[in-house]
Amino acid sequence: LAKTTQPISMDSYEGQEVNITCSHNNIATNDYITWYQQFPSQGPRFIIQGYKTKVTNEVASLFIPADRKSSTLSLPRVSLSDTAVYYCLVGDADTNAGKSTFGDGTTLTVKP
Amino acid sequence: DTEVTQTPKHLVMGMTNKKSLKCEQHMGHRAMYWYKQKAKKPPELMFVYSYEKLSINESVPSRFSPECPNSSLLNLHLHALQPEDSALYLCASSQGFTRSSYEQYFGPGTRLTVT
């Protein structure tokens, strides 16, 4: 499983766009990139997943450059309720039989 | 229904007790997972079940015993735990072992305290 590196923490203000970058230099050809959000004392919640270029859903966008050695989660116009820990996971479920390893995560604090 | 339920929400047990954690999903998912999460740390994978068979055991001590009675239910039997086993225990499910297995649905967790 590819090791991931994320900033430990980030601060932002309401209404701003937040970009959280994850480095995964050892990403394999078949690996997908998945992001989760976790609030205190709750289970993680799936946000978005991608393989290359750009993926967008109603919550976030995921940008993946051509070399796929990093990825950026973009949260548009954050609010106080987006304060949470964000985890980046990289892996190929077929090869790893469902095994996944969460990185240390990024604690995002949104201020008023 | 995209919900994974876990019971109980909180559990306090002594080191000689036997207890069980329960997890249930009705999304037709064929893969189910147990994770352990300590405070301010990421979730750590413990067990993976695929089609009701144990496929991964991440070298978890035998005082934790998983069970998958059917495709909707997952149990974690606890016996002779240690205080360091106190943590949030999370259950998750996914469709299977494709890239979608990383789209996991997590329950709210059971907060376990071992005294």
Image: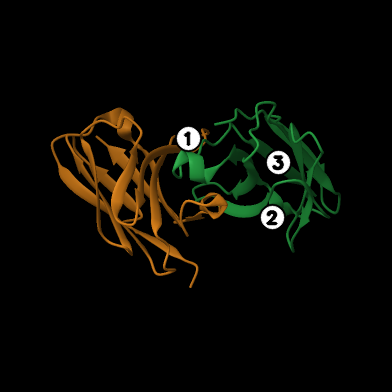
Q: To which chain does the residue with label 2 belong?
A: A
- Vertically, is A7 above or below B96? above
Position of residue A112 measured from the top left corner of the image (x, y, whole percent): 80, 49
Q: Give the label on residue A81, or none.
A: 2
- Vertically, is A46 above or below B72? above
**Residue, x 74% and y 31% (percent of image)?**
A69
User: What residue would you read off at disc 1?
Assistant: B39
The secondary structure type at the circle numbered 3 is strand
Would residue B73 be visible to someone looking at this image? yes
Position of residue A53 measured from the top left corner of the image (x, y, whole percent): 80, 47
Q: Residues within 10 Å of mark 2 (few under 14, many from 20)?
A: few
Rounded to the nearest angstrom, the CA distance separating label 3 from label 2 is 10 Å
User: What residue would you read off at disc 3?
Assistant: A108
Position of residue A33 measured from the top left corner of the image (x, y, whole percent): 65, 43
| Figure colour of chain B | orange
- Vertically, is B41 above or below A111? above
Q: Give the label on residue B99, or none.
A: none
Q: Does label 2 lie on the same chain as label 3?
A: yes
Picture quarter containing residue B59? top left
Rounded to the nearest angstrom, the CA distance separating label 2 from label 1 is 20 Å
| Figure colour of chain A | green
The secondary structure type at the circle numbered 1 is loop
Q: Amino acid at mark 3?
A: Leu
Rounded to the nearest angstrom, the CA distance separating label 3 from label 1 is 17 Å
**Residue, x 34% and y 44% (percent of image)?**
B55
The secondary structure type at the circle numbered 2 is helix
Choose between B109 and B31: the one closer to the eye. Answer: B31
Is residue A52 rendered to the left or right of residue B73?
right
Q: To which chain does the residue with label 1 belong?
A: B
Q: To which chain does the residue with label 3 belong?
A: A
Q: Amino acid at mark 1?
A: Ala
Q: Residue furthest left?
A: B16
